[in-house]
Amino acid sequence: MSSSAQGIPGLPDLTHPIELVQFGTHALKASLLLVFLIVALGVAIAGFLILYLIFSALTEMGTKLPWKK
């Protein structure tokens, strides 16, 4: 094998543990951010769904909404 063989670009070499730990730290931060964004999106969608269900139930019962005349 030639000495110019390279690993996967962007991934740290396994013989450099400090770089590997830094890579893991960055990957963990990115995955946590992704989880928080997905949870926030789910909460927002659930909120809109609850509001939609409440307003549709009110209109079916014949309740006048303040902004509808």
Image: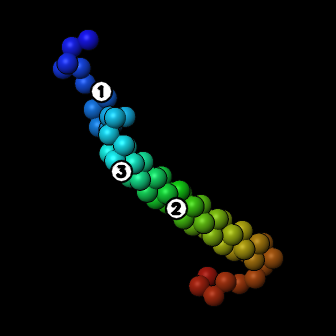
Vertical relation: 68 (above or below) 28 = below
**Earlier sequence position, callout 1 versus callout 3:** 1
Using the numbered discs, state the Cα–Cα distance from disc 2 to disc 3 in whole angstroms.
21 Å
Using a 10 Å C-alpha cutoff, classify the residue at mark 1 as few (fewer than 14 neighbours), some (14 to 19) or many (20 or more). Answer: few
Q: Identify the residue under disc 1.
A: 7
Q: Residue at x 49, y 57 (%)?
A: 32
The quadrant holding residue 45 is bottom right
Task: Specify the label residue 36 is tagged with.
Answer: 2
- Quadrant the C terminus occupies: bottom right
Q: Residue furthest right?
A: 61
- Quadrant the N terminus occupies: top left
Task: Specify the label residue 22 is tagged with.
Answer: 3
Amino acid type for the residue under numbered disc 1: Gly
Count of marks overlaid on the render: 3
Q: Are marks 1 and 3 in contact (CB under 8 Å)?
A: no
Q: Residue furthest top?
A: 1
Using a 10 Å C-alpha cutoff, classify the residue at mark 2 as few (fewer than 14 neighbours), some (14 to 19) or many (20 or more). Answer: few
Label 3 sits on a secondary structure element that is helix
Q: Residue at x 18, y 20 (%)?
A: 4
